[in-house]
Amino acid sequence: MRAGKMNTVSVESNQSQSSSSPFKGNFTVITLSSVVKSFGGGLISAYVSLYFVELGGDPVALGLMAAFASIIGSAMFLLGGFIADYHGRRKIVVLAAFYGVFFPSLYAVVQDWRLFAALNVVAAFGLVSSPAIHALVVDSISPRKRTMGIASLQVFSSLPVAVAPLIGGWLIQNNGLINGFRLACIYAGISAFISALILLLLKETLQCGANAKSGLSNYSKLKGILQLPRSLPFSLKGLMLSYGFVAFANGAVGQYYILYASSVVGLTPLEWAPIASLQSLVIILKIPGGWLSDKLGKRKIMMFSVLACAPCGVLFTLSHSFFQVLIVSLLLIVTGAYFAPAYDALQADLTPRIMRGRITALWQLNGGLSTAVGALLGGFAFQAVDPTLPFYLFTAAEFVAALFLISLVREPEKKEI
């Protein structure tokens, strides 16, 4: 199925979206929904690794859980990208949001790490809406303001997490790790439900052709899930390759920061809480970073971000106190915060609107599989070899990502709208 068979919404509507401020319409709805959801998620996300180990799991099992969730998510990205481009964005976003409401409450009642891991993997099916959300956002922002708009969304969504880990840490400190985490899960479920209700206000940005509305009724429709143009821009391929190494790097360490801080440095959950909170607050730097990306060039900002962030993995292993962990953790965010908005915007600049959902799915498939490999290697290295090894893998992978950015990626002369 060719992307050219898709009919977009009216030109007048699209031009109106592109010329107006990004802080309107779908952008505002998605931002508000994300703010509410991220508050609930922030109550528990910083402590999942500790809770998992407390239930009887270990770092290797934690890596397996993260890897399987990433693999399931990758498959969902492909399906979600097809749905976003051929059947519209809004419906899948809303349905997936209500699907995700159930899991925080279920986390609150499980008493075995195996069941917790299984629920975590099943929850990954909700990632089917991720390409559609990304497409809705970039559809609603003009190319001139794209990086700034994406950075603003990411910052606003992260601000509640500056407070949430403190509350989660306080709940754990006063009720114990098990009961405190479960109580936080109940609040996270309430936040997820409110977030899903807000998404009912979304407006569709892509109108499907008559043939697309008939559904996956034959082989050619199924084949359309994986069908992309024969020749993708060379820079887009290089960009995705670079992103794969960044995703691998983050997957190798993402689950193990708090485990290292707890088991090696000796920090308590309440001591980790302000570190997680300040990391979320420092993300506000994405806004001036987005402005710089639009002015100076997205590729330049991405190269700076990756090269500056790479040494932080090694520096983390040299931390032996609360203040040292705090400083390096903030350096990780200060240097790495500029990458994601610039990447999202540059990918959008290189991708036509009618295939944006599928390209986003391919990008997220790449990221999901890379994260899965990183999580598996990171968990094995942390438990079986040396707790510092995942952080050395992070540094090496970041430098490789920078190499691909420098050698393969160029910004387009004409940006896609």
Image (cartoon, grey):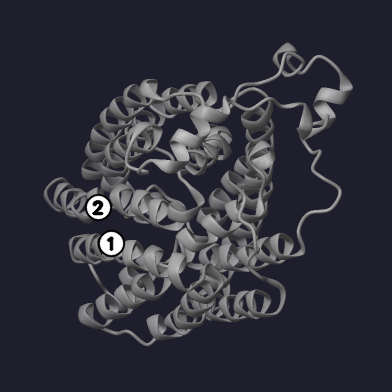
What is the three-letter code of the residue carrying label 2?
Leu
Residue under circle 1?
284
Residue under circle 2?
159
Q: Nearer the viewer, mark 2 or mark 1?
A: 1
Q: Residue at x 43, y 53 (%)?
A: 145
Question: Which corner quadrant holds the N terminus?
Answer: top right
Do tag 2 and tag 1 residues touch (Cβ < 8 Å)?
A: yes
Residue 127 to residue 368: above or below? above
**Mark pair 2, 1: CA separation:** 8 Å
Q: How many marks?
A: 2
Q: Position of residue 165 (x, y in %)?
A: 23, 53
Is residue 364 visible to us here?
yes
**Is 400 or 6 nearer to us in this picture?**
6
Q: Position of residue 323 (x, y in %)?
A: 21, 80
Question: In what element is the residue under mark 1?
Answer: helix
Question: In what element is the residue under mark 2?
Answer: helix
Pick whichever of labels 2 and 1 is earlier in the sequence: 2
**Is 248 or 183 nearer to us in this picture?**
248
